[in-house]
Amino acid sequence: MSTASGTGLGATLRTWRDRLPPSAAALPVGPARRATGLRREELADLAGVSVDYVVRLEQGRATTPSAPVVASLARALQLSPAERDHLYRLARLLPPGDGAVGDAIPPGVRRVLDRLGDAAVAVFAADWRLIRWNPCWAGLLGDPSAVPSGLRNFARDRFPVDAAPPRLARWPVTESDPGAVDAAVVSDLRRATGRFPRDPRLSALIDELAAGNAHFAALWAAGTVAAHREDDKTLHHPAAGPLTVNCDVLTEGDTELKVVIMTAAPGDEARLRQVSATAAGTASAADAPRAEP
């Protein structure tokens, strides 16, 4: 990122320095003061670095500060956790919070899920473990509640090891472009390793699939980084018959949770409503506790 763009490390530091009033850092404010934010000298003193280094950072002549320096700057600038993590990434460092894949669903996401009506909705963690679903999802694909939480994983279903059967869909599902879905899931997992490089559950999943599924290993070796976004699927439902759905994947920014929403393709709305009505008596699954692989 270039400093001129206003989004690079130097420009971002300058923006945060300018917005922090001296009073917030317990510094005196004299009548002759012209700067509304911190002076470079004040930031350097608060962070325990030299003024020259702050100048070089802001001018883009220094672009890779160490983790201790970034931590000191974040404290001196009184950054929020999200801003602190952003500063680490701008410095090409691993944020301290990027340790584990999370299974907790934020309240705002829950509210959205509860308002999606007849759509079949499920939430997956960054490693594609299924952690929540609504009754329509259970009616459309089969109730996954009897499957052990560690095996409720879309990547495991896409790339079975030792001829393991699918666990998240109880009846056949065909896709408009299965090869693209395979590639997207693998590249999405690679993207997750950049976000959660120290997560043991994610690492164990990738090691298992790479060792036990040749197709996964070949796709993983390609090194593509992307995200799974959308697909069309036909579900061969035992009661409703062939049912075509549009499948969209939304990613929650802070947690990397994937919200998968299936809605009926034109002409199949009535049959999806029938499945949803039949499944209405089925309780929504509780959030699955985090479990080791």
Image: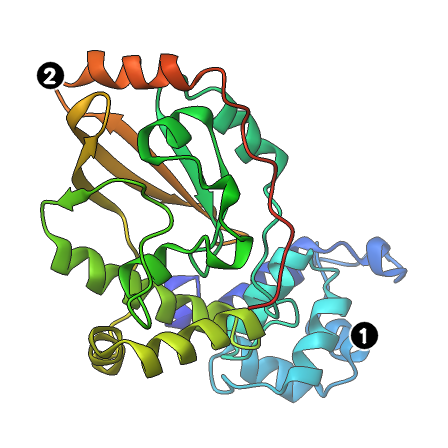
Q: Position of residue 66 (x, y in %)?
A: 62, 87
- From the image, tell me which residue sits under label 1: 46
Instruction: Tell me if I can see residue 58 in this picture.
Output: yes
- From the image, tell me which residue sits under label 2: 267
Q: Secondary structure at mark 1?
A: helix
Q: Position of residue 38 (x, y in %)?
A: 73, 63
Q: For residue 264, which quarter of the picture?
A: top left
Horizontal side of 64 relative to 179 (left or right) equals: right
The residues tagged by marks 1 and 2 sit, at their Cα atoms, a distance apart of 64 Å
Give the mark, 1 or 2, whose residue is nearer the N terminus.
1
Task: State the residue in front, 47 or 131.
Answer: 131
Q: Nearer the viewer, mark 1 or mark 2?
A: 2
Task: State the residue in front, 238 or 217.
Answer: 238
Taking the spot 90% from the left edge, 60% from the top edge, the residue there is: 26
Task: State the residue in front, 101 or 237.
Answer: 237
Q: Position of residue 285 (x, y in %)?
A: 55, 34
Above or below for 112 versus 54: above
Instruction: Tell me if I can see residue 31 in this picture.
Output: no
Residue flagged by tag 1: what amino acid is it? Leu
